[in-house]
Amino acid sequence: MRVLVHGSELAAATAAAALSWVGHSVVWRPHASEDWDTLTASGWLTSEPQLKDRLEEARATGHLRILAADEFPDEGAAFDVLWLALSPEQRGDAADAVAQASAALSSEAVLVNNSTFPVGDTDQLEAGFGGRHAVALADLLEEGRAWEAFTRPSRWLLGCDDDAAEQQVRELLRAFNRRREVFQRMPRRAAELTKLAINGMLATRISYMNEIAGLADSLGVDVEHVRQGMGADTRIGYEYLYPGCGFGGPNFSRDLMRLADVQSASGRHSALLDQVVDINEHKKETLFRKLWAHFHGRLEGRVVAIWGAAFKPGTARIDHAPVLTLLRALWAQGVRVRLHDPAAVGALRERLGEHPLLELFDGDPFEASEGADALMLVTEWKAYWNPDWPRLAGQLSGRLLLDGRNIYDPGHVASMGLHYRGIGRRADP
């Protein structure tokens, strides 16, 4: 099939790479705000496993063509599919993008709206699509494993009100639907709301578990026992039941805001969503509060090492990441920070510039922890899971390890002569 992809989101890049990989003829037109030259230099694209290599491979085989910022698809190209993957902030550009592409589409073309827009936007896009059909395909990709999620999907959540349009989308994605049936079809508006509701539920589970972790701290209970007891209940399960120092990321945070906007637009107010967001923002400061308590508020002039800045392992993005809140709190107290991340250092430099209280490292994590009073684990990169404990213990003059993701065993850390403070967990030498 002939496919025109528009957008600069992870969903657009992954669709362009994967669809061309299985033989479709794909033209990708990135959004004007992030053309191909900008994307190739971005940390998130280069750090996403396989993705950039797959894009270059597809270009070399001729299955993928990437347009320049001022370039438009050829009129009369008769594309079968327009794949739209814009960010929520680019929602106002969607109708214009569809109108500009119309001359290059066949009369039977289908619009696949892979953007996370408010409920009802796919209906509006179809109204301006020249009598053609539009479907809503929920963006369920996860940063750090986007290629795997697209090419070996657990499901496709398809909002579709026309049988012929469904068949066209099924043919488009047939190569990724061979192992088992992965399509779940429902009306368009239902699919749009379901996508937002999913992330709302996941965020609620995380925030609830963080509340329980805070209570466990107050009661002197190890929250790991509680987590395992809860997860063993088949009505609950273990997924997204890990307490931590707050979640971030562009999609998760935006979807929560989008769901709140949908609630407001419908004349409803969600006190629950407000609480979920508030708990998460509060939790982003939890490691700072533990540091303050341990040193009795005497923080000025201290040195703190931070391992991890990206909002999750496997990505270079720091959008809404807990580390940003944490840095502001530390700097307000005159704390010098030595921070290591294997992928997100570039994004931090771009976001924060040169700061007199910040040193950045992307090589050996122990360079950052050298001479520190305490270490904060913020992002659970695999490289951090099994450090050289005697070496680390010898570096931390304040003998304090603050584990924001509960990846370490408190007893083992304490046996190395360190004070351990996790989220709902603690141990002393």
Image: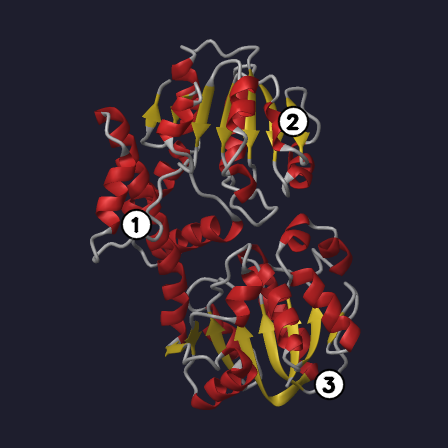
Q: Position of residue 90 (x, y in %)?
A: 59, 58
**Quadrant in the rendering for residue 371:** top right
Q: Are marks 1 and 2 in contact (CB under 8 Å)?
A: no
**Left or right: residue 32 compared with residue 242:** right
Q: Is residue 123 above or below residue 278?
A: below
Q: Is residue 89 above or below residue 193?
A: above
In this view of the protein, can residue 114 be seen by the observer?
A: no
Question: Label 3 amino acid?
Answer: Ala
Q: Tell me, what colour scheme is on the image?
A: secondary structure
For label 3, the residue is 77
**Quadrant in the rendering for residue 306:** top right
For label 1, the residue is 269
Q: Position of residue 365 (x, y in %)?
A: 61, 32
Q: Are marks 3 and 2 in contact (CB under 8 Å)?
A: no
Structural distance between the alpha carbons of marks 3 and 1: 46 Å
Q: Earlier in the sequence, mark 3 or mark 2?
A: 3
**Left or right: residue 138 compared with residue 372:** left
Structural distance between the alpha carbons of marks 1 and 2: 48 Å
Q: Quadrant of the C terminus?
A: top left
The crowding category of the residue bearing disc 3, from other C-alpha atoms within 10 Å (few below 14, some 14 to 19, many at least 20), is few
Label annotation for residue 367: 2
In this view of the protein, can residue 345 be seen by the observer?
A: yes
Q: Quadrant of the N terminus?
A: bottom right
Residue depicted at x 56% and y 50%: 314
Q: Position of residue 354 (x, y in %)?
A: 71, 27
Question: Label 1 amino acid?
Answer: His
| Residue closer to the observer: 88 or 153 | 153
